[in-house]
Each structure stands twice: as C-alpha cells, then as structure tokens.
Amino acid sequence: MKRPHTAIAIHTILLVLCTFMVAIGLRFWQLDRPDLNYDELHYASDAYRWISHDSSISLRDHPMSHPSPNMAHPFGSLTLTSFAFLINGTSVFTARVIPALCGICLLIVLLFFNGKLKAVTIPVMIIYALLPLTVRYNRAAYLDSFFALAITVSVLGIWKFAHNKSKWIWGAITGAALGLAVSTKIDGLMAVIIDLGLFFVIRRRHEKTSGNIFLLVFICTAAVVSLLLNNPAAYAFGILHPSDPNAHLFALDAIKRLLRFPIENAPIAWGLLSPGITIACIIALWRLCKQKTMTDRFLLVWFIGTFGIALVQEMGKSGEWGWLPMIPPLLFIIMRMIATLQTRQRWIITAALLLSMLPYTYMYGLYLSPLPFRKSVEFNETQQDIFYQSVIKTTNALTAREEKVFFDTTEQIPLFMLRSDINRVHIRQTADILITTTPQTPSADVIHITTLQAFQDGQIVTRYIYRQSH
C-alpha cells in the first residue's frame, strides 16, 4: 500500500506535468497566427538582419547604430531569435518561438521559490500557465517574455540567498539575470532598483559579511554581463535620444499614467487578467499593505518595482505586454491571501478563479477575438489575419531561383521570410516579379499571375502579383 505522502507526491507531479503540457499547447498552437504587428515585425527583422551581417545592426551599439525608426532597446535577447532563425529557418513561428519558450521556462522558475512561498508555487504556476495576458504575450515576438524571465530569475536568486542558499552561486545567478534584463530593454535599469530594494529587505536575515559578499558578487556579475552585451555610450544614447517616447524611463507622463491607471486600465485588467483575478488582486493588495512580515515586504517591493515598469508602457493602445514582469509577484500575493483560508474555501476560490479565466484565455489569449477595449485596429489582430504572410509565401512559390522581385510597398510585409535565393530589387523595370497594391495596365510585357485579397486591419487589403518580361 502506498503511503499517503507518496500518493500526494505522485499526484503533485502529475498535476505539474499536465500544467506544462497545457501551457505548451496554449503557447505553441498556431503560433504563426496572426501576422506580426509593427513592433513584432521590427524585432524579428532586426534579428534577421543581424545574421545577414547588416552593418546597421550591432550587438553592443544597437541603440546608437540602428537607423530610424529605432526602438532604443539593447539587442541582447534578440540574439536568441537570430539563432532560432539559423536553426529553424525564417518564419513567423520561429520569430515567436523564443518568447513562447521563455513563458514555459518561467513556469519552471516559479517552482524553485521555497520558504513561505513554497506552499503556493504550484497554484501560482497553474494560473500563470492559463492567464489570458501571459498566454497572449508569450505568443508574441516582443522582448518582454525574456525580460520577465530574467527579472524573475534575479528575484529568485535574492530569495534563495535569504533562505541560506549559497551566496556565491545565487549571487552570480542574480547578477547574470539582472545583466540580461538590462541588456534586453532600457527599462531593465529599473530591475536594478528592484533587486537592490529586495536585497535590503532580506539583509537582516544574514550576518553582515555574508550579505556584503552576496551583494558584491551579484553587482560584479551584473556589470560584467551588461558590459559584454552593451556599449555604455550606446546605452546612454538610447536613454537620452529615443525615437519612441515611451522609452523615457522617468518621463513626467508616467505620473499622469499613474493617476489615470485605475480608470484606463480597468477594462484591460478585466479582459486580460479576467474578472476573478482582477477582484482578487485588489483585495490581496489591500491586505498586503497591512502585513509586516519579511515575505510580505519582499512581495510588496517586487510588485511595486514591476508595476513601475508597467507604467512606462502605453496602456490601452499597445503596451499591455509590459505587465508580464508584474504577473509573478501579483499571483504570489493573491495566492498567499487565499492560502490563509480553510482548505475547502481555498479549493473553491482557486477553482472559481481558474474558471473565470478560461473564456478570456480562449478569446483573447489565443487571438480568437479582438480585444474589446482597444478601439484602434493596430495591435489587435486575430487568428484569421494572415494576409501579409500569404503575400510572402505566394511570392516564394511563384518565383524561380535567382529571379528578381519588386514590392511597391513593404509595409507590414515580413521580408525576412523571402527565400534567400530570391533577389529583391528597388527598381521596378529590373524585376521579374512585381508585387503591387494597384492593378497594372495590361500589356505584352506584364502578365497577371494572381490577386491576393483579405479584410484585415479594418480595411480590404489587396496585392497584385505580375510577371514582367524583359
């Protein structure tokens, strides 16, 4: 006969494995749908240009060397997308595979939190796996999935040190993760403040020498990683001269956003966190402010820091993916509140939270319905919006080796998917294949091949493909 604790362990392992399987399915199902939006296309194109040896793409000088438009972010995490292109070929699926894998890896990281957070790691992991916001933006080719993973790993290192784990190993892990966060987004500078704040929260648990060694190890490691991946002058240029105004970390507009946050972001929270999680979040944060334990202070500092990162995004228009680093502390805060209830109440409330999430995950997490709170058609594609991929795939199918193609506009076209043995030219008369937005006048020199048309981005979009004889 199996012992009770053995049976519980087996059930726990099965639950964790099932959660991972569901999380993988949600993040990889039809990952190539919809088309890349403007930001995703920008990042994917940069990753491709790096492996194509484009002189304007530089690993360490990216914010300063990139031609306009420049997102002003470092290039660090995009190297992973570049390697993915080398391994798996250029496609929308490959452009998104690294963020999806980062979402899965973050589930693993959550399981490593021990101490007073250990009892809630599994429910936190399950909710993170199913949450509409995390599913939706782990499926997008943004920097934020990797950014959230790096920040969470750096926080885990400090938490592990607080619970008497190796100051050398976890100091190095914390520093390396922090260096990667700094090398992923300009906002990563705020992660430095978060980690220092968390260190001072847990410092009293250790004698002074041990704490100083940990601090020295993690700061030195973070500095080494950051300097390896970034030229300080280029990084400073990205802060001071961004083409994207949202890159200003300490812009005065962030204060206005803080004041507008409850009203403007209520629909976002309702749709992408779900009603149950939104209500639980408000109650749990109110309760947390009255707690004085080290664990509660740790979670509060972690949440406030990542909330600050979320504030610098342009909410309601595009930037909800900036919430990703904030989700782990938020879920820990909610589940710690629920853990104080009786066993039956915990099960009922947790089940209710999960059930309230699923319809929103289905509709918005998997891009099956447009986000209702976003009035603009930009950044609001659904699974059926694959017109621009179809243009490239059709061009690849109709063009022979070494033939020349001409696009009269490349807006939203994932040119990195164009076959490498096809030559793209900028002079119409020299092309073998023409891809145009307007029909051509019939002639003996221009033969119509096909017409592609779809309703996308709130309008009917059309591309005509012609073969031109010389």
Image: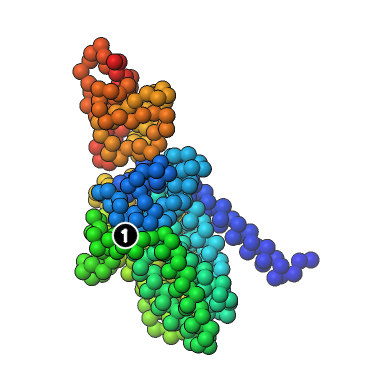
Whole-percent x, y for residue 342 in the image: 54, 76
- Is residue 250 at all visible to an observer of this figure? yes
Whether residue 90 is situated above or below residue 273 in the rendered picture: above
- Kind of element beneath mark 1: helix
User: In the image, what residue occupies the spot 52% across and 58% down?
Assistant: 105
Name the foreground residue: 63 vs 22: 63
Quarter assignment of residue 464? top left
Count all numbered tags in the image, as a single digit.
1
Q: Amino acid at mark 1?
A: Ala
Name the foreground residue: 46 vs 379: 46
Q: Residue furthest top?
A: 444
Whether residue 194 is situated above or below residue 41 in the rendered picture: below
Whole-percent x, y for residue 468 in the image: 29, 18
Name the foreground residue: 75 vs 195: 75
User: In the image, what residue occupies the spot 42% across and 74% down?
Assistant: 195
Whole-percent x, y for residue 79 in the image: 44, 51
Whether residue 320 is situated above or below residue 450 in the rendered picture: below
User: In the image, what residue occupies the spot 28% across and 66% down?
Assistant: 249
Whole-percent x, y for residue 390 in the image: 37, 32
What residue sits right under mark 1 in the picture? 234
Q: Is residue 354 left or right of residue 72?
A: right
**Rendered-image quadrant of the N terminus:** bottom right
- Is residue 265 at all visible to an observer of this figure? no
User: In the image, what residue occupies the spot 71% across and 70% down?
Assistant: 4
**Rendered-image quadrant of the C terminus:** top left
Q: Residue furthest right?
A: 1
